[in-house]
Amino acid sequence: MNIALTLTFTDWWSLFLHFISLSLLAVGGAITTAPDIHRYLVDEQHWLTDTQFTSSIALAQGAPGPNVMFVALMGWNVGLNAGGGLAAGWPAISLALLGVVVTMVGIMIPSCTLTFVATQWAHRNRELRAVKAFKAGMAPIVIALLIATGWLLTGSHEHPALDWPLWALTAVTTVVVWKTKTHLLVLLGLGALLGGMGWI
């Protein structure tokens, strides 16, 4: 389901600047910025629906390649909504491609530049106590951001309190990932199977 909206140059610029700022907060990968992306695109701007948001993440996570592709899908959906949906033809597809470029360039350029510079410096100074402390301190932050993303994705259904099978599956999957070496594709496949059978 598409949203009918019109984006001005200022809106596109704001989208770009927002993803630039998120890029510098993407500790542990772009997926950790999902809660703020949801706040901005769904709750604040209303440029995406909850379904488009969760579908973008699910499709990118299930597809081969880097998980940052969910950002491209969100940009695609924002542009597609601005163009009136796929039924509007090439003008809508052009805006969807613009959305991909705006969001991906915004999320990639600052973090890639910072990562390159910081990695070079940290490698040269790896024996410093501050560098070791920084690396050790980042682990809990990454874990907390991933938990927040999982909570957002799990709770984004229309009736989260009634979706006890979804909550149970989330809890079981968390334990399996934590305690075993089960490949994530196996878990994704099982989740898709349960969803296809209508159990989740």
Image: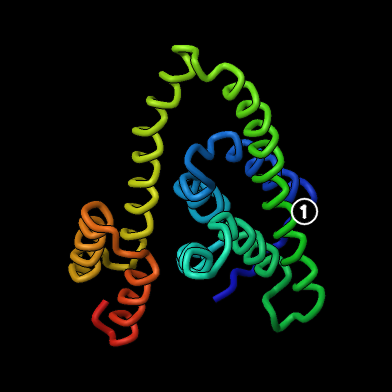
> Which quadrant of the structure image shows residue 174?
bottom left
**Is 94 in front, or is 6?**
94
Q: What residue sits right under mark 1 in the picture?
A: 8
Q: Residue at x 74, y 50 (%)?
A: 12
Can residue 47 be seen from the camera position used here? no
Q: Is residue 191 above or below residue 193?
A: above
Quadrant (top left, top right, bottom left, bottom right) of the N terminus: bottom right
Return the x and y of residue 11 as percentages of the image width and height: 72, 49
Q: Is residue 120 above or below residue 167?
A: above
Residue 180 locus on image (x, y percent): 24, 57
Determine whether the residue tagged by mark 1 lies in a helix, strand or loop: loop
| Foreground pick, 169 / 87 | 169
The quarter of the picture where the C terminus appears is bottom left
Residue type at numbered disc 1: Thr
Q: Is residue 173 left or right of residue 47?
A: left
Q: Residue at x 68, y 27 (%)?
A: 117
Query: In percent of the image, x 67 and y 52: which residue is there?
Result: 103
- For mark 1, does the 10 Å Cα neighbourhood hold few (<14), some (14 to 19), or many (20 or more) residues? few
Residue 155 seen in the current view: yes
Q: Quadrant of residue 23?
A: top right
Q: Image check: 89 left or right of 195?
A: right
Which residue is the extreme one toward the top? 129
